[in-house]
Image (cartoon, rainbow, N blue to C red):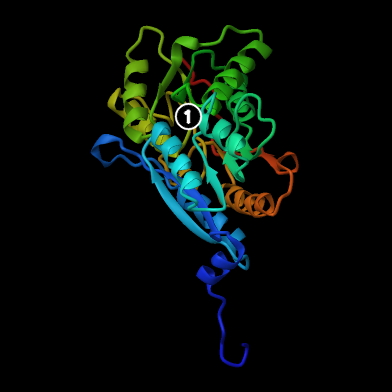
C-alpha cells in the first residue's frame, strides 16, 4: 500500500466500523443587522480544533446555527440522522437543552462554556466570573465608583458569571454594585456604541467600562466620542479577548488575553478522547485570561 501511495478511504472505514469519522462543530453566525462586526474568535477556535484533529481519522464538519433554538434542532438532527460521532458547541445557556439531550442519548460531546452545575460532561471554558471581577477591581482600585458592565444576554451562563464577578468586586471593596450600569445585548460594536451613549447621557454616568469583547469595546470608544468624551482623558475602558486588536485602538486599552486557539485545541483533543470512551469527568479545563495592562485606568482628575 505504501508503494502505490495508498490513502485510507474514510467512507470505507465508516462502513467497516459503523462510524461516520466526522467531528461536528456547531458554529454560531451573527444575524445582527447592518453587517456588524462581532469578532474573529470562532475562526481561531476552529483553527485550534482542526489542529487537534490532525493525524486522527476524524474530519471536521461545520454546522451553521443561527440561535439557541436552531442549535438544539441541529444537535438533534446530527444525532438522529447519524451525521457525526461527536460534537462541539458553544453559547451555553443557564439550562441548556442540548446538554440534557446529548447526555440522554449518551452521545460524545464537549462544550465551550459550562452551566452553573457543570457535572457529567466534558467542557472547556474561561473563568468569566474571575475576569469580570479582576477588571472591575482594577477600576475600583483606580478610584472609580461608577462602573458599567457591557454584557451578553443574561440567559447565557457566562453572562451570569460575569455579573456575579462584577458584583463580587464591589462587595469585596465594601461598595454598592452599579446594577443600573449593566447593559445586556448582542456582542457587536453597534451594541457597545449604543450602550455607551445611553449610559453616558445619565445624570450619574459611568467613569469606567468593563467590556465583554473587542467589538463591544470598539463600540464603546465610538459612543464615548459621540458624547464628546475620550478614553484617554475622561473615561477608563477595559476590553477583553486581546486578539491583536486592542493594541491598535486609540488609545491602546487594557484587556485580558483569551487564549482562543489553545482553547480550540483543547476542545478538539477532548472530543477525540471522549469519542474513544474516556469519562467526561477527566475532560475539563478552565482557563484564566492574562491581564494586558496598557493604561493606568485611574479615575480622571475632576
Residue 178, position in %: x, y? Answer: 51, 11
Instruction: Answer left or right for 169 relative to 22.
Output: right
Residue 247, visible in the rendered structure: no
Instruction: Answer left or right for 44 relative to 175.
Output: left
- Picture residue at 42% right of the left edge, 37% below the top: 73
Residue marked by disc 1: 211
Q: How many marks?
A: 1
Check the image and report above or below for 61 versus 8. Answer: above
Task: Indicate the secondary structure of the residue bearing disc 1.
Answer: loop
Instruction: Answer left or right for 76 relative to 270.
Output: left
Q: Which one is in front, 158 or 247?
A: 158
Instruction: Answer left or right for 149 relative to 64.
Output: right
- Picture residue at 43% right of the left edge, 31% below the top: 232
Query: In which quarter of the view is residue 77 placed?
Result: top left
Residue 211, position in %: x, y? Answer: 47, 29
Categorize mark 1 by other alpha carbons within 10 Å: few (<14), some (14-19), many (20+). Answer: many
Identify the image quadrant of the N terminus.
bottom right
Q: Which one is in front, 98 or 288?
A: 98
Query: In which quarter of the view is residue 119 placed?
Result: top right
Residue 146, position in %: x, y? Answer: 49, 13
Q: Which one is in front, 162 or 60?
A: 60
Residue 215, visible in the rendered structure: yes
- Picture residue at 63% right of the left edge, 50% below the top: 271
Residue 270, position in %: x, y? Answer: 66, 50
| Residue found farthest to the bottom | 3
Amino acid at each position: 500500500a505504501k508503494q502505490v501511495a495508498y490513502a485510507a478511504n474514510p467512507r470505507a472505514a465508516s462502513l467497516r466500523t459503523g462510524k461516520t469519522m466526522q467531528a461536528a462543530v456547531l458554529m454560531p453566525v451573527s444575524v445582527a443587522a447592518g453587517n456588524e462586526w462581532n469578532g474573529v474568535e470562532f475562526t481561531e477556535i476552529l483553527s485550534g480544533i482542526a489542529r487537534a484533529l490532525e493525524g486522527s481519522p476524524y474530519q471536521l464538519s461545520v454546522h451553521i446555527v443561527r440561535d439557541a433554538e436552531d442549535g438544539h434542532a441541529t444537535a438533534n438532527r446530527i444525532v438522529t440522522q447519524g451525521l457525526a460521532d461527536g460534537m462541539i458547541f458553544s453559547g451555553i445557556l443557564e439550562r441548556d437543552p442540548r446538554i440534557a439531550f446529548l447526555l440522554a442519548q449518551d452521545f460524545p460531546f464537549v462544550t465551550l462554556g459550562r452551566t452553573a452545575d457543570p457535572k457529567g460532561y466534558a467542557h472547556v471554558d474561561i473563568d468569566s466570573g474571575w475576569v469580570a471581577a479582576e477588571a472591575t477591581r482594577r477600576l475600583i482600585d483606580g478610584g472609580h465608583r461608577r462602573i458599567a458592565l457591557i454584557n451578553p444576554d443574561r440567559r447565557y451562563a457566562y453572562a451570569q458569571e460575569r455579573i456575579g464577578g462584577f458584583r463580587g468586586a464591589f462587595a469585596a471593596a465594601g461598595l454598592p454594585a452599579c446594577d443600573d450600569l449593566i447593559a445586556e445585548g448582542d456582542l457587536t460594536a453597534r451594541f457597545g456604541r449604543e450602550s455607551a451613549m445611553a449610559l453616558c447621557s445619565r445624570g450619574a454616568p459611568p467613569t469606567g467600562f468593563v467590556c465583554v469583547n473587542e467589538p463591544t469595546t470598539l463600540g464603546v470608544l465610538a459612543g464615548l466620542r459621540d458624547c464628546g468624551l475620550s478614553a484617554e482623558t475622561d473615561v477608563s475602558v477595559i476590553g477583553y479577548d486581546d486578539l491583536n486588536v486592542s493594541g491598535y485602538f486609540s488609545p491602546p486599552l487594557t484587556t485580558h488575553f483569551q487564549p482562543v486557539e489553545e482553547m480550540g485545541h483543547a476542545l478538539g483533543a477532548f472530543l477525540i478522547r471522549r469519542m474513544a470512551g474516556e469519562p467526561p469527568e477527566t475532560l475539563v479545563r478552565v482557563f484564566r485570561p492574562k491581564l494586558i495592562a496598557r493604561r493606568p485606568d485611574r479615575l480622571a482628575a475632576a
